[in-house]
Image (cartoon, grey):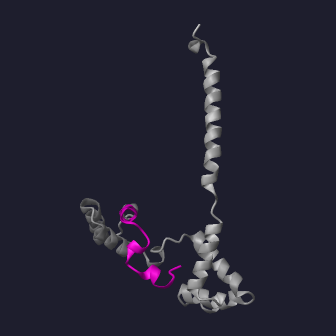
Amino acid sequence: MGLDAAARSTDWSAWYSAKERKRLAMRYTPRNVVEFQLQQRCRSSGSVAHCDAFLTTRLDAWARAPMPFEARSSLLWLALEHGGAGAYDRLRAHATDTPAVALEAASGTEVGALLEEWLAWVRTQRPDVAGQASHSRWLALTWILLFAGLATRSTRWRLG
């Protein structure tokens, strides 16, 4: 979903750091000589400007914002939830418009407010991986000690 100017913008620094833009430029295969030359300049000079130029010519407008299919579908789900009855019909009526206009029509909410609510919802759905790390460490240490203890019972490891 190319929402507003974010997806049409050639300002890659709004979405990615310099290191990420260089890595992203190396991930794609050039389709023509111009793209190949831009990618080679990005690789050899290390200039982020060359990487940005390659990304701008290589990627379509919808791919510029880092929103995978799952994210776009959950945003659409939220817009349809907000719109209530008839939201899907309003969405289909604006099928030829930009995604932002279609989402506003379906949800009855300004797209900026809808994005803020969606982002807050995404943040609440994040798993608490930091809380599970200490439990995993102790479990791994227990298994290591158990197997080390069993290994010392072998005849090769006996001291006496």
Instruction: Give residue 50's position: percent from left, percent from top.
Output: 29, 69
Magenta span dominant secondary structure:
helix
Quarter holding the C terminus?
A: top right
Q: Is residue 104 left or right of residue 37?
A: right
* Residue 10 lies within the magenta run: yes
- For image coordinates 59% across by 89% down, the residue present is 110
Residue 91's place in the image compared with 73, above or below, is: below
In the image, residue 90 sits, relative to residue 159, either above or below, namely below
Q: Residue at horizontal 36%, vertical 75%?
A: 56
Residue 142 is at least partly visible in this image: yes
- Residue 92 falls in which quadrant of the image? bottom right
Tag count in the figure? 0
Q: In x, y percent, where is residue 96?
A: 55, 90
The residue under the point 35% across, 63% down is: 22
In the image, residue 131 sits, relative to residue 160, either above or below, namely below
Q: Indicate yes or no whether the magenta region holds residue 5.
A: yes
From this viewpoint, is residue 73 visible?
no
Q: Residue furthest top?
A: 160
* Image quadrant assignment for residue 99: bottom right
Q: Nearer the viewer, residue 39 or 104?
A: 104
Horizontal and vertical percent for residue 106? Answer: 65, 88
**Position of residue 81 measured from the top left corner of the image (x, y, whole percent):** 71, 81
Q: Quadrant of residue 102?
A: bottom right
Residue drawn at x 45%, y 74% as measured from the top left: 64
Q: Which residues are magenta?
A: 1-24
